[in-house]
Image: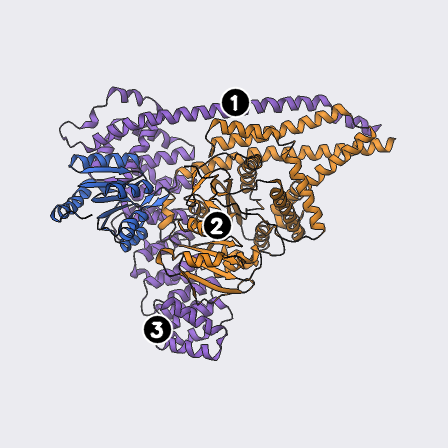
Chain colours: A blue, B purple, C orange
Amino acid sequence: MKILIVEDNQLLLKVLETKLKKEGYEVISCENGKDAIDEIIYSSPDLIITDIMLPYSSGLEIVNFVKVTLKKSTPVIVLSGIGQEKTVEEAFKLGVDDYMTKPFSLSELSMRIKRFSRIFSATPLQS
Amino acid sequence: MFHADIFSNLIQPGYLNKLTILFICLNAFLIAAIFIYLRKKKRTHFIQRGIKKSIELWISKILLSEDETEPAYMHIPSKFQKHFRDKTKREFTVNQLIDIKKNLSGKIAENINHLYEHLGFRRDSLVKFQSNIWNRRAKGIHELYMMDQKNMLPVLYKYTNSNNQYVRMEAQAALIHFSGFEGLSFLDNIDHPISEWEQLKILEQLKLIDFTEMKNLGRWLRSQNFSVVLLALKLAEVYQEFQVHDDVAECLQHKDEKVRSQAIITLSRIANEYTSSILVQYYSNETLANRQQILKCLMNMASDNEKDFLVTHLHDENDSLKLAAARVIAKCCSNGWEMLKEIAKEQPHPYSEIYFHVKNELQ
Amino acid sequence: MNWQVIISEALTIGLFFYSIVLLLFYIFIGLYSIGETRKYLHKNNFTDYRLLAASEHSPSVSIIAPAFNEGQTIVENVRSLLSIYYSNLELIIVNDGSKDDSLQKLIDVYQLEKIDFFVRYQIKTKNVRGVYKSKNPAFKKLIVVDKENGGKADALNAGVNISNNDYIICIDVDCILEQDAILKLIKPFLEQTQEKIIAVGGVIRIANSCEIKDGKLEKVHLPKAYLPRMQALEYIRAFLLARMAWSRLNGLLLISGAFGAFDKDVVIKCGGYNHNTVGEDMELVVRMRRYMEEKKQPYKVTFIPDPLCWTEAPSSFLILGRQRNRWMRGTIETLGMHKKMFYNPRYRLLGMLSYPYWFFFEMMAPIIEFFGVVVFIIMASMGIVEWPIFFSLLLFIISFGFLYSSFAIFMEVITYNQYKKRTDILKLLLTSFSEPFIYHPFIVWASIRGITDLLRKKKNWGEMTRQGFGSPAIIKT
């Protein structure tokens, strides 16, 4: 399964990337919303994990792009930080599938990704 | 002539020229300083970028290592040992570790703490903490609590009342980090005002922690420190502490307008059957801003009991109050809409506009 | 003849003393600003601004942007403003009776519909013809107010009337804002304890030659053209040094009309912007201060050194001249309206220091300089100039000017350093060397014209023709 991670904190991004690669997923990393949107168009990831606050854009723009503009069913998990409840609410209105509040446990995230990957392997490939 | 003497003494070209030369020298010095600084910054930038990648790689390996018997953090590659003799690089690494702690919890967080202690960064934090310069002390406290150095807790307590606002904030954050809601005990003794920014930080930090009973909430509501009362009111609002309803109602008589304003908001969240009439009672003594607040909050709890009161104030000379009252009538009174429609027919200006405005908002 | 010499010497001494006092003020301002800027930078390290963006305890803010005949760029500008991330926010665009298609463009692009809105005229303004909101929930923060033409002050007042929130941010609609500009501008209001913060201003930077795409600043470049580059230096001096120092003293009289935040309640209580002056931004701040002084309530007007807002600066002498002409008229009108405060101890620092400083050194400076030049010419024609003294004095003043500019650039470099390339800094320094010979005399001349125009009661806004940020010359690919 191809996972796109969008996170501006480089160390966190590295940690997430390493962890997910260890678990056998294919990982693409981006540090901002603009690159993420390009990657979504070109690489069509199967799962997107994005921070909700990114420089020069909001993670919501990515969610909006995937769920509203492209109308894809790709699962999106948002990572939210302190003081961002309202943003998470808005994300759910746009159709986000899951969220994790920072600080979060890596093993928890891993389990939630496994849940989506089971759905992924169960259903035939959708474009 | 008399003037000429003073004149030539004052503005001797000699003096002026000396000053001019002084200015030119200072100028040259500043320009040199500018370029030296720029070069230094560029160099630091490249050094940091250089070690950044390798540190990130190394740290992520350590954090993800699952080997219990020989923890990876015990072995520091010699090149990093060399790096960590440099204060700037240590500072950079500590900041990275704190960043990660803000994002990740669980086993990884423990590993970060071990790494922090093992690399001797705790010593750096303590040095900062003991400094008398406010921003260094505050940074020291920040590092110590972010890295879960719980044994510092007793020492930190007194800094929650420090003269410097930022040292106070970090110490308070530390207390809450270590003791959760119990950590709010600093509110018992704090002399300094707690700004709205500090209150916001405290409230947001508390959201990440499991709720426990705040036994002293009532006491804080009666504190001499206005800002403690304000924060307590917000806590009562956020955590819906119904049991302090009467204490909150007392706050409607407080000297400070902002405290009363928050008391109104809090009451609307912990309302009981008497709250509406209490608010109506205090209305006439209140400032314009608080009257608007009362009407706004009545939208959540008013009933036909308040109908007469509302209709009276629908005709208040202040337009904002007219509008606010209209909203409550529409939302809470039976036949509210019909009443407004009638009044709008009788007096189209301004009640017709008000009617349609409210209709647009609420329907 | 003797009396000619006496007079000329007296005038020279007078001018000399004036210059010395001015120099001393500048030195004081330069050094005094450092502490404030450093404190702010340190505080920033402990501040996670993103907390403010979505917290339910954050203050409610309305951005008010008046627009007149901005049809060419209005859609782009609004899109840039709509991308600001702050949850409790309203964006109020006031169409001040534009004669072009500004309103229609907004209606089309943002799917606006006219709604029933009860306008409370807390401040008297020209008639509001309609209030529009979007049918599309993505644009729910946007409110467009269409009203009869009344000028910038009137449009801002209309925005204040419509606003539902506690704080207002007044901006020029074509300003490009930094990502967290709003957060940084609002935070000082939350930090107040003893003194009520009534207004906050931030740094305005020059956007000429910068890369701007989709209403966002992509890359910063030093302006290529001479005049904008000169203004870049001028703004650094004014904002990083002067305003920071005055803010620290709590004597700041001016918050730029291009970008400033205000406590709405105080604005309404003061009666809003005054439309009888072209310097409505300065006049409002002075009046708000005066109101708080008269009420004897402790208050502060704050300035933060963070660059928050980028705007296009005039690049032709004509437009620049008009702008400085207008600023001078605004200053004189404002000082005139509040002359009661001049050396009036009842107004404390405001009356005893700020007002006199603005009077003698901001308003009178161009007049005295011009007067000095005239006197010099007369003296030279009469052959009574003592050339050694004259040249010493001239070199003295010019070298101080260079020193001051270098200091400003130094402060810029060690704080925010928007121009990172060494060559850019060098260019900035070189530009400062030309200032006393080209730029400064022009500014003095424009200010004198302002005074003469005022005396002739010329009262219009002048026009700044918009070039638009979309011009191909600016965007690089």
Q: Position of residue C449 (x, y in %)?
A: 69, 44
Residue kind at label 1, given as amino acid type: Ala
SS at circle 1: helix
Quarter occupied by residue B141? top left
Image quarter of the N terminus of chain A: top left
| CA gap, disc 1 and disc 2 | 43 Å
Residue B354, numbered label: none
Q: Secondary structure at mark 3?
A: loop
Q: Nearer the viewer, residue C370 or C449?
A: C449
Q: Are marks 2 and 3 on the same chain?
A: no
Query: Which residue is labeled 3 in the image?
Result: B303
* Residue where numbered disc 2 is placed: C73
Is there any visible trace of residue A91 in the rendered image?
A: yes
Give a yes or no on whether discs 3 and 1 share a subunit: yes
**Residue at figure coordinates x 38%, y 75% from the top left:** B337
Q: Which x, y percent locates residue B15? A: 70, 23
Distance, label 3 to label 1, CA atoms, is: 74 Å
Q: Local crowd at mark 1 within 10 Å, few (<14), some, or many (≥20)?
A: few
Q: Amino acid at mark 2?
A: Thr
Q: Hey, which residue is sitting farthest front in the picture?
A: C472
Disc 1 designates what residue? B32
Question: In which quarter of the view is residue B8 placed?
Answer: top right
Rendered view: C452 above or below B336: above
